[in-house]
Structure formats: C-alpha cells, structure tokens
C-alpha cells in the first residue's frame, strides 16, 4: 500500500527502531506540517518461527514455548493453548485448578496494565510517573514470584490443571498485595485522570468511534474504551470466571460518557486493575478444596495426549484483549498445526482511524494506547515480496468457494 | 490536582526505592571491587531475597539418576541431553528456561531447584 | 584604560572555564535531584563531566545529505555565543566582564543565538526528525520571547522612572538597587508575577521537559540533536551547560541581586566569599524551581499547547505585572 502524497507533505517513519516503540513495527506517516494525513504500517520485523518450532515438540514442551510468545502476558498463551488441547481431549481441570488459573491470570492483568500505564506516561514525556507506576508494579511481581517461583514467566499452567498449588500459608501474602492495590488505586486514578497536563494530552486524542472499533475488529480494553461490550471472561465465562460475575468495564462507569479517546483507554485499564484485585480477593477467599490437576504426573499426561485426534480452539481474555489458539492433533507426539492470534493483531487496524488527522506529538501515545506487542503478533513473514497479498474481500470470496466445495463434498 | 507533584516533592526527602545491589555506583574496576570484597574492605549490598519456591539454577544429583531419559523428553529447550556412554544427562545451563518440568517428571527426584540466580557469565561452560 | 581592557581580556579564559565547570556541576546536581524525586539513586555528581569527556573522544558522524560545513559549524557557534553571553552577565555579584559594551537588550538578543544555532544545525542535518524539531524550536523561541521582553521592559521602565538619567537597560543600574526597594505594594505584586513569568520562561529557554517538544525523545527521537554525535554533541552540551549559568545569573541580577555580606556584617575577603557562596545558593534555587522540579513534575506539551501557554497565559500574567508596576510608578509620581 502506498500512501497518498500531497503538495508540501513529507513522510516520517516511526520505527522499526524508535525510542517511542519498545518493539519493532514500522509506521509510515505522511505528514502535512504537524498533521498526520496518511498512515500505513509494516509488520513482521521479529518473526521467530514459534509455530514451526511447535510442530517438533510434544504438547508439554509447546506449553513453555507458548509462554515465550510474550514477555508480559505469558500466561494467557499457556492458558489458551492448554484450553485448546483440553477441548480436543474433553479434559476438565478440577475446580481448584480453575480458581488458581483465574488468580494467576488476574495477577498478570494487574502487572500488564500497570506496566502499560508507565509506558504511556513515558510516551507523554512524564518519566517521573513512569518510575512511580513501575515502583507500584514491583509488589505484584513479588507476589507472582512468591506463588510461582519466578517474577515474569509463571509456568503455572499444565494441560488439565495447574503446576503450583496455592497453599493456605501463601494466601495472606496475596491478600496483602490486593490491599496494596486497593489503597493505591485512588492515588493512581487521581494522578492519571485529574492531572491537568496528562488530561490535556489524552482527552479527545486518538478517537476510535464505536463504529470503527466494530469494523476494525478491535478487542480488549481498546474496544471497551470505545463502548463495545466485549470481554471473553463474560462472553465465554471459562475457567472459574462464571463464579465472579465479571462485567466488561466501559469508560462511562467512571465519567458517565464514552469518547473512545486515549483518556478512556487509560481509564478502562486503571479500572480493570481494581476489578482484577477484586476478582483475586474473591477467588482467594472462596477457593474450593481438591486436586490441582487432572493428572499429576507429566509422563502420564503425555501418554494420554498422544492418541488424541482433532481440532481445538482456546480463548482467553489477555490483558490486551482476546487471545485465540488453534491446535490440530493427528495422533502423533507433536501437534500437526498450531495457530496463535494475539490481541495486537486485531488492535492494529484501529491505528488508522485513530492516527488520521492527529499531530506528530500524539503518534507515540496513540500507538502505545492499544498496548501493542509486536513479538506476539508476528506469526508470518513474506520472504519474497512478490507473494500476492489478499484483501479482505478476496479472502471472503475464497472462503465462500471453500464452503461451497465442502457442501458439494457433503452432498455426495 | 497536583497529587503527583506533591508525591514527587515528598520522595525528594525519602530513601531511593532502588535496591543498591551490588554497590551504589558502578566501580572503576570490577576486579578491584571483588578483590576488596574478598579482603573484607568493602561490603556488597545483598540482593532482594528470593522466596522458598524460587526456580533458580538446577541441582543434579548424578548418583541418584537412573538414566530413564524422562527429563530429556519434556525439556522444551533441550537443555538436558542424554549421554549414552555414562547413561546420565548433561545439563546445559545457558539453554535452560527454568520451567521446572524436569523436576516434576523425575521419578527419583535427582533434579531440584536451587536459589542461585546470578548466572550471567562471559564463558559458555 | 588599556590596562583594564587587557585585564578583562585575560579574564575571559578563567571565566569561561569556571562557567563550564559550574554549568556541568549544576547539571550533575540537577540529575541527582531529579533521580531522588523519582525514587531512584541517580548518577554520581561527576557524570556530566564524564559524558563530555566520552563524547569528545567519539567520532563525529555527518549524515550523507547534510550540508556538512553548516552542520559542523553550528556547534561552535552555539558554544561561542554562550561564552560571549557569559561575558555580558553579572556573575557572583560582580559587574559583567564587558560592562559598558552591551546591556540587557543585547543579552536578550544574544540569548537567541544558541537556540538559533541549534535550529540551523537541525535544518542542515537533513533528517526529517531534525527538521520537525527545528520548526518546533523556532516556534517555541518566538513564543517565549514575548513574555520575556515584557518582563525586561517592565523592569527597565521601573528603573528609568525611579532613577532618571540612569542607563535603564544596563545591569549596573538594575543591580545597584534591588527592584523590590523601588515599588510599593501593587508594584511588589507585579514584580512577583514577573518573577514567576521569568522562571517559567527560563524552563522554555533551557528546553526542559514540558517545553522540550523540539527534542521530544519519544516523538521525534531527539529532534534537533538526532543527527549530532561525538564532539559536535559535546559542544552543544557544553553550550547548554553555560546557558544554565547565564540564565540563572540574569534572573538573579534582575530579581534577587541581594548580597549577604552586608547583613552578616562581613567585609573583606570573608564578605566576598560569603557573597559568592550566596550567589551559588541563589543559582541553585532558581535552577531547582525553573528546571529540575518543573521538568520532573510535568508531561511534555504539544507544540500548539506551548504556543498557547506562552502567548496566552504567560503573556497575560506578564502584562498584568507590567500594568501593576505602571500603576505603582504613576502613583509614586503623583
């Protein structure tokens, strides 16, 4: 796609290496003065061939490979992958394991959102706020380390359960952490939502209308900030989420109106930190007793998984939005196919309506407002540039043809 | 309004949040610092303590190992490689991802985690 | 007379060295305090010296499309103009080195030189980031110049009204009697407003965070300076270090020219030393308020917001101060 040129306009590329982006993506901007008049982006700067590597490993190994897809929200990939396998084998994790999964996922959400808040502050040039929020983030990292043994990569999930139990003696430390976030929530909200400079930089900047959010298939906080009620935790109510009555958070819960701008996205994420803390508190207090895994011994799990045949899909509401994993098993040791769709993949198209007509100064904060994670997104790379690129319409036509073919096959 | 500004001013008079591990500022020569520490002239600030269930460097008890190769089957990064001559496994620390799958699968519990985490080195061995 | 001139010329080198030393030292203190406010430890105080040393050792890289001679000349222009500025401002309570050869008006114009050198260097480096940065820097310069000019004109007016015959724009006339002694209550309020304005303008002059859209690390990757490296960057760094001292001295000369020796009853060398020490303390306070604290405690403004703040609010406050001082003068005359 080439960008339209105008008289007196010039182009700036943000990325693949740029101080505003922590991960490589190339944003090509056509600029007129200080105004953005054209947006395009190029992906696949960090293709790692993870899906290929997975077809050479058994499911238990892929689990840890999946964890390495993303450095921040690693558990969501593990959980989605194991849920995909569980659908194939009709495996059900015991209730206690589901509760521990929820606790882990919500701790991860707190961690991810606070990390994002710091990055957003940095994009605005407010480094003190970045240092302050990351100071608050240490608490949840320590809690994660206390429960699972490592600060970032939790290694918490196994197929059909969890790997680390949360014994009675660890619960006070979790509750302490939850209370820490309760007590700091008001201050965080005041700093991010009432600070005059931050408000002037985020209010009515990078607006994504509800219509645009729906047509560009935004997910997660990006979609919710534009008023789309969409949350896998509510829509599918997997794991133990049905017990906690998770309501998708829309910005009008706090301000009474929905703008769909950067301010709303900050707001949604901050409120979700509080929501996560509430879920963890409830989950910890009402955790049922029982086993923590469908099958304790990894060797037995492997033996039981090997004969499985079928396709499965695992969904999970990651901090950034919905993660979907598709797995196909054909009765061999390693999966025949594995496809990961990370939330950033969906949240990138909204960049175009968000960035159009904004100033150069707002590019970093708008680009960061979807919480992009490039390494999670890059699943394919076109080595020779001659490969045809399909548009959405062409793809739709192809799928029609395929369906017709399949129907014909069924009729026979 | 101005909550952050007040907080920043307060922090000016507080101790820094940073854990000053191993020393406050980068020394001119690391070798000299280590020598001084060895002699007891200088002290190193301790790192943040790790919890009991910390997943650090693996400890491998060679005598207990029965050579069943279970750990090499589940290791996602091939950090444990079976040596056919000695019928034991070799542990490559630089490849290890500290997932702990080998620890949970080992039938004789000859693999376990230590709390050691300062594993960066110039040499690969 | 000629002896005096020679003595002054001989003084240029030590004053320059001292200016660079104090400027870099204050940069070190500034970084340390900013780090403490962010709950970090921060670099050692000598870090700016080390930075300069290292940059001096590094290779100069000139972009392929740059206008090489302009690109390489501008760092020298920036440093040279900063050093010249240093000769025109009163340091440590002493009269300026080149007193009688230029006044406040000259300093006002000269203050634009380092920034202009940055702008020209930015345009010459041919990078789109630097070009955007240079445009922004020009806009910022135009924006803060107006409230600054109002402030200086107000002070000169006050001096000429109360002490007729004195050269109103010369530093000696302004520092001779602290301006606060010349006004009544209304004028004091006016002066306080102008003081606030000049502190705020100093932040912009130094290109610190809320007004650093010309450099804007996360937006345009360092803007003006994005193509500069090695020795050229070191020269710009030194120029900005000297500018700290210059700006601080101007603010001190205009608003807080008090010495401490008179109050403490010291005279001779002890008195001089006390005054020099007091000057450094004043410089520190001005720097802490106008640079360190504001830079730590705010997010970056968009360039449109910078213009709005300087041309709108700051100019309004400066005009209000001017009117109050004017009222005070007229009431005094009547």
Image (cartoon, rainbow, N blue to C red):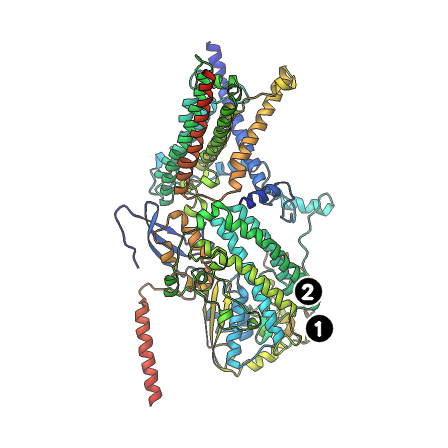
- Left or right: C98, with C50 as reference point: left
For mark 2, give the secondary structure: helix
Residue closest to the far top: C1
- The C terminus of chain C lies in quadrant: top left
Q: Residues within 10 Å of mark 1 (few under 14, many from 20)?
A: few
Q: Residues within 10 Å of mark 2 (few under 14, many from 20)?
A: few
Q: Residue at x 56, y 66 (%)?
A: A105
Q: Which residue is drawn at 54% across and 38% down?
A: C293
Q: Which residue is drawn at 64% across and 67% down?
A: A284
The location of residue A238, given as percent across then percent down, is 53, 73
| Residue matched to label 2 | A170
Q: Which sits in the foreground, C101 or C311?
A: C311
Q: Which sits in the foreground, B7 or C15?
A: B7
Q: Is residue C311 visible?
A: yes
For mark 1, give the secondary structure: loop
Q: Is residue A133 above or below residue A154?
A: above
Q: How far apart are marks 1 and 2 (CA)?
A: 32 Å
| Residue matched to label 1 | B64
């Amino acid at each position: 796609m080439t960008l339209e040129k105008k008289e007196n306009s010039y182009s700036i590329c943000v990325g693949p290496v740029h101080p505003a982006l922590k991960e490589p993506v190339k944003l090509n901007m056509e600029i007129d003065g200080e105004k953005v008049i054209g947006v395009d982006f190029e992906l696949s700067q960090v293709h790692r061939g993870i899906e290929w590597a997975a077809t050479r490993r058994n499911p238990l190994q892929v689990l840890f490979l999946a964890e390495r897809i993303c450095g921040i929200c690693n558990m969501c990939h593990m959980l989605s992958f194991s849920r995909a396998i569980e659908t194939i084998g009709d495996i059900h994790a015991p209730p206690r394991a589901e509760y521990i999964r929820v606790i882990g996922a919500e701790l991860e959400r707190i961690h991810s959102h606070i990390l994002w808040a710091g990055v957003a502050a940095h994009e605005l040039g407010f480094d003190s706020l970045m240092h302050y929020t990351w100071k608050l983030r240490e608490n949840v990292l320590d809690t994660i380390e206390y429960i699972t043994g490592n600060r970032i990569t939790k290694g918490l999930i196994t197929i059909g359960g969890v790997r680390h139990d949360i014994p009675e003696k660890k619960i006070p430390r979790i509750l302490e952490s939850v209370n820490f976030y309760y007590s700091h929530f008001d201050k965080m909200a005041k700093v991010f939502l009432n600070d005059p400079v931050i408000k002037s930089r985020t209010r009515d900047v990078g607006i994504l209308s509800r219509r645009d959010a729906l047509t560009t298939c935004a997910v997660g906080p990006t979609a919710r900030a534009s008023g789309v009620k969409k949350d896998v935790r509510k829509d599918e109510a997997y794991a133990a989420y049905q017990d906690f009555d998770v309501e998708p958070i829309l910005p009008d819960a706090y301000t009474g109106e929905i703008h769909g701008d950067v301010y709303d996205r900050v707001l949604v994420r901050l409120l979700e930190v509080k929501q996560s803390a509430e879920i963890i508190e409830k989950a910890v207090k009402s955790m049922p007793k029982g086993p923590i895994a469908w099958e304790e011994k990894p060797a037995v799990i492997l033996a039981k998984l090997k004969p499985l045949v079928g396709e499965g899909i695992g969904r999970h509401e990651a901090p950034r939005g919905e993660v979907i994993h598709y797995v196909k098993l054909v009765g061999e040791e390693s999966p025949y196919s594995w496809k990961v769709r990370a939330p950033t993949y969906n949240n990138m198209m909204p960049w175009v309506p968000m960035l159009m007509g904004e100033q150069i100064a707002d590019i970093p904060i708008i680009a960061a407002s979807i919480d992009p994670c490039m390494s999670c997104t890059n699943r394919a790379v076109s080595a020779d540039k001659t490969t045809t690129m399909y548009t959405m319409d062409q793809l739709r036509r192809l799928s029609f043809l395929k369906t017709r073919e399949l129907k014909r096959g069924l009729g026979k | 309004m101005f909550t952050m500004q007040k907080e920043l001013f307060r922090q000016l008079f507080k101790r820094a949040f940073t854990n000053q591990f191993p020393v406050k500022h980068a020394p001119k020569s690391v070798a000299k610092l280590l020598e001084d520490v060895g002699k007891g002239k200088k002290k190193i600030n301790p790192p943040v303590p790790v919890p009991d269930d910390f997943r650090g460097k693996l400890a491998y008890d060679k005598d207990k190992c029965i050579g069943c190769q279970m750990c090499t089957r589940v290791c996602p990064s091939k950090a444990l490689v079976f040596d056919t001559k000695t019928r034991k496994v070799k542990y490559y620390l630089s490849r290890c991802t500290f997932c702990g799958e080998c620890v949970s699968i080992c039938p004789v519990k000859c693999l376990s985690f230590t709390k050691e985490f300062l594993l960066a080195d110039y040499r690969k061995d | 007379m000629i002896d005096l001139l020679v003595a002054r010329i001989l003084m240029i080198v030590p004053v320059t060295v001292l200016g660079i030393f104090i400027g870099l030292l204050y940069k070190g203190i500034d970084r340390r305090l900013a780090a403490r406010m962010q709950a970090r430890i921060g670099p050692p105080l000598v870090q700016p010296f080390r930075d300069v040393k290292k940059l001096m050792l590094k290779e100069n890289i000139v972009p392929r499309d740059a206008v090489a001679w302009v690109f390489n000349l501008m760092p020298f222009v920036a440093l040279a103009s900063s050093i010249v500025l240093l000769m025109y401002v009163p340091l440590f309570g002493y009269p300026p080195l080149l007193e009688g050869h230029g006044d406040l008006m000259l300093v006002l114009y000269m203050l634009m030189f380092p920034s202009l050198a940055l702008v020209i260097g930015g345009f010459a480096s041919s990078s789109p980031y630097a070009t955007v940065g240079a445009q922004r820097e020009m806009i910022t310069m135009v924006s803060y110049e107006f409230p600054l000019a109002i402030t200086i004109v107000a002070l000169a007016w006050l001096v000429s009204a109360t002490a007729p015959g004195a050269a109103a724009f010369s530093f000696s006339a302004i520092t001779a009697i602290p301006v606060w002694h010349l006004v009544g209550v209304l004028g004091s309020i006016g002066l306080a407003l102008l003081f606030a304005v000049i502190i705020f303008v100093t932040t912009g002059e130094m290109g610190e965070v809320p007004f650093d859209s010309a450099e804007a690390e996360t937006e345009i990757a360092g803007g003006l300076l994005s193509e500069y490296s090695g020795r050229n960057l070191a020269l710009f760094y030194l120029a900005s270090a000297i500018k700290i001292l210059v700006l601080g001295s101007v603010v001190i000369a205009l608003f807080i020219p008090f010495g401490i020796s008179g109050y403490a009853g010291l005279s001779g060398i002890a008195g001089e030393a006390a005054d020099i020490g007091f000057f450094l303390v004043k410089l520190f306070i001005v720097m802490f308020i106008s640079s360190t604290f504001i830079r730590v405690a705010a997010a970056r403004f968009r360039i449109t917001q910078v213009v709005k703040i300087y041309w709108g609010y700051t100019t309004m406050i400066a005009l209000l101060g001017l009117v109050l001082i004017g009222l005070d003068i007229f009431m005094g005359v009547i």
